[in-house]
């Protein structure tokens, strides 16, 4: 678990010193942006500007659980119902690269030999986030692909610096913290 604290600029050094000193005995450790990004990626949590933005709808982003289309009216409900009824054209999926290569934000997702119904090299979508996963030991990512290519294990490629790196659609979240047993 983590926390974000907000305080007056001038108070920050004193707050930092007090927190780190008080937390020493409890294993408190500071964590930066890179840590936050890796953890949220492993947990399949969306980041605004990467997985979601003003052009994304919650259904394609896998956030349909946030909007209850059958629980009363709200702004945007009719538009989401229409999208659901028309069918999604793309969906956010987990990605794992096979071998060397790390999927990064903005890299093209392309068809490879074995991608159902597609020609190798055809651009399918885009990587929204990617990183080595210290918890799983895998190179993981998230990205948008056509809605008919979301089955776990579907072969795809990630174009990394002009080379196609083998990858596949993967189950998410990549890591889920175990529930502690009740003793």
Image (tube, rainbow, N blue to C red):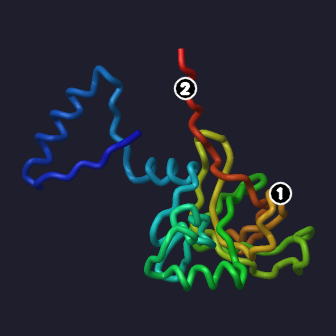
Vertical order, 22 against 127 (above or below) = above
Q: Name the residue at 58% across, 68% down.
A: 128
Density class for disc 1 (Cα within 10 Å; few <14, some 14-19, many ≥20) is: some
Vertical position of residue 45 compared to residue 144: above or below:
above
Q: Judge from the rendering whether residue 94 lies leftward or rightward of residue 24; answer left or right.
A: right
Contact (Cβ within 8 Å) of mark 2 with mark 1: no
From this viewpoint, which residue is outermost toward the top? 183
Which callout, 2 or 1, points to the residue nearer the camera? 2
Residue 52: x and y, percent?
51, 72
The image shows residue 171 at horizontal and vertical percentages of: 72, 52
For image coordinates 10% across by 54% down, the residue present is 8
The percent coordinates of residue 98 (x first, y second) are 78, 54
User: Closer to the N terminus: mark 2 or mark 1?
Assistant: 1
Which corner quadrant of the image does residue 145 belong to?
bottom right
Residue 153: mark: 1
Q: Which of 17 and 92 is in front in this view?
A: 92
Please, is residue 117 above or below residue 29 in the view? Answer: below
Which quadrant is the N terminus positioned in? top left
Q: Is mark 2 on a helix, strand or loop?
A: loop
Q: Name the residue under label 2.
A: 180
Report, in whole angstroms, how far the alpha carbon at label 2 lies from the one at label 1. 30 Å
Q: In which quarter of the image is residue 41?
A: bottom right
Percent coordinates x, y for residue 106 in the rendering: 59, 74
- Residue visible at 80% across and 67% down? 156
Tally of numbered discs: 2
Q: Residues within 10 Å of mark 2 (few under 14, many from 20)?
A: few
Please give left or right for residue 5 compared with residue 53 in the image.
left
């Amino acid at each position: 678990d983590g926390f974000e604290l907000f305080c007056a600029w001038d108070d920050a050094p004193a707050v930092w010193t007090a927190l780190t000193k008080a937390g020493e005995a409890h294993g408190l450790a500071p964590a930066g942006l890179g840590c936050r990004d890796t953890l949220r990626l492993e947990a399949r949590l969306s980041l605004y500007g990467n997985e979601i933005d003003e052009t994304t709808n919650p259904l394609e982003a896998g956030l349909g659980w946030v909007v209850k289309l059958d629980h009363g009216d709200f702004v945007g409900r009719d538009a989401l119902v229409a999208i659901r009824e028309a069918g999604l054209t793309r969906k956010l999926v987990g990605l794992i690269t096979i071998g060397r290569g790390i999927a990064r934000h903005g890299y093209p997702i392309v068809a490879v030999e074995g991608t159902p119904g597609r020609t190798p090299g055809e651009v399918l979508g885009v990587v929204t986030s990617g990183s080595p996963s210290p918890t799983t030991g895998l190179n993981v990512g998230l990205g948008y692909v056509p809605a008919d290519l979301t089955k776990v294990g579907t072969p795809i490629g990630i174009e990394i610096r002009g080379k196609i790196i083998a990858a596949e659609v993967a189950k998410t979240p990549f890591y889920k913290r175990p529930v502690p047993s009740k003793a």
